[in-house]
Image (tube, rainbow, N blue to C red):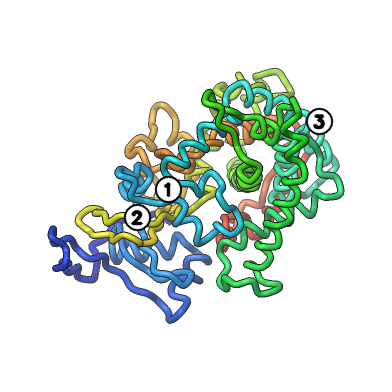
Amino acid sequence: MSITAQTPTQPISPDSQSPKYLCTIPGDGGKPLIGYTLEFMKDPIDMLQKRYQRYGEISWVNVFGIRMVQMIGPDATQFVFMNKGNIFSNNQGWDFFIGKFFHRGIMLLDFEEHRWHRRIMQQAFNKPVLKAYIQRMNPQIEHGIQQLRHKKKLNILPTIKQLTLNLATDVFMGGKLGKENDKINDAFIHTVKAGTALIRKPVPGLRWKKGLDSRKVLEDFFYTRIAKKRKSHEDDMFSVLCRAETEDGDRFTDDDIVNHMIFLMMAAHDTSTITLSTMFYHLAKNPEWQEKVREESRALGKKYLDYDDLDKMTALSLVMKESLRMCPPVPSIPRKTVKDCEFKGFKIPKGSMINIFPYFNGYMEAYWKDPETFDPERFSDKRREDKIHPYAWAPFGGGAHKCIGLHFADLQVKAIMHQVVLNYRWSVDKDYEMPLDTTSLPVPKDGLPVKWEKIK
């Protein structure tokens, strides 16, 4: 649904304790104990639209048992991402949700420590390494999609999730998991879902406990392989991180490597799966765009995409950007203030949990024409609707914490799509609308069933 601004319906009173007489943040807690948690998990866009119309760009709300300041719109997104003066802590924001499961991953580090880790990690995402990654990927992609040649119907989500996991285990770890494949896949699923657990205690059978147990499975898996990887000369990401060293001789500890690998595997696996699922859906609903992408790939005259081909995939780039606008894999982003700050006349005290919403920003009529319509041309050079505000479209974040793997994501998504469109067509019924499960990261609730056809 598209979003338009309305005047807040509740008065905003000045805060007499502030020397600047800043306004206090308006808001309401919702239902006792659970607040707006269920509404937020069920339909975040609808919930945020109502709050935006009632309160404007900033309001407080109770979700997941805490008071959260919701900061809505590109201006708020820019204010938080740029983080001038080191006001906002990534660690303290994300820690509440996923700290127990993705402890000290690169996204959960702050300030100078984050910059130190990022300098080392960048070696795993530089151009020569990315070129090696796509060479590793291409045969694995071909093998994976060949398994689909006799299918007439296909559920996209589990199919792509398995393919991206297989790619991640090869590109990131340098080999197939074999009999451990299902165990590791389940572990990643449970660690992600645990972040939105309603009961945040280790109760057997519930999300939080499953997440803790799964974290232990992943730790054991990586720790037992570090010594061998440090000695290897392989070009998988695990080996690169184990050997990575700055000019000053700084290296990662074993604990650092395990923490980063668990986080990076999750990030590359889940975000690419969500992006690809959204692209598959829109290309099924818009067969003219599917054919544009197919003709573009055919024009290359090669079955595998090379690194130097990525910028040539103009139609595919437009489809990917539009899909990320309509469904960013990380729809909301938490932070915590470590200092008092001010946003547009509102006082945000130190210690406030805040949330920003790239998902919501993509449906604001002030920035996007007909935002509910799939229209990749909005990103074309002639239109560039995303340029109306630098943070209207921010699926990869921004500032010091802009996604370190954004070029890897672009590479992986395009390499997969290139081979798929050369070999298959797919479609959905005209009246089909993909239902989204937003209880954790946004995924097709029904797995996205499509009609599948091998191109002869």
- Mark 2, Cα crowd under 10 Å, few <14 / some 14-19 / many 20+, is some
Q: Which residue is mark 1?
A: 362
Residue shown at the point (79%, 36%) measured from the top left: 175
Of label 1 and label 2, which has the lower sequence position? 2
Q: Are marks 3 and 2 in contact (CB under 8 Å)?
A: no
Q: Secondary structure at mark 1?
A: loop
Tell me how far mark 3 sits from mark 2, CA to CA.
Answer: 60 Å
Residue 4 drawn at (x, y percent): 32, 55
Q: Is residue 128 left or right of residue 142?
A: left
Q: Position of residue 388 (x, y in %)?
A: 32, 37
Residue identified by numbered label 3: 456
Query: From the viewer's perspective, is the residue at label 1 or at label 2 nearer?
Result: 2
Within-10-Å neighbours for mark 1: few <14, some 14–19, many 20+: many
Figure check: 214 above or below 358: below
Type of amino acid under label 2: Val
Determine contact: label 3, label 1, CB under 8 Å: no
Give the SS element for disc 3. Answer: loop
Q: Amino acid at mark 3?
A: Lys
Residue 211, how many percent across, how many down? 65, 62
Viewer-side residue, 97 vs 153: 97
Q: In which quarter of the view is residue 187 placed?
A: bottom right
Q: Residues within 10 Å of mark 3 (few under 14, many from 20)?
A: few
Residue 57: mark? none
Q: Earlier in the sequence, mark 3 or mark 2?
A: 2
Of residue 67 and residue 35, the one placed in the foreground of this image is 67
Nearer the observer, disc 3 or disc 2? 2
Instruction: Identify the residue position indicated by label 2 in the image.
Output: 338
On the picture, is 190 further left or further right than 48?
right
Secondary structure of the residue carrying numbered label 2? loop
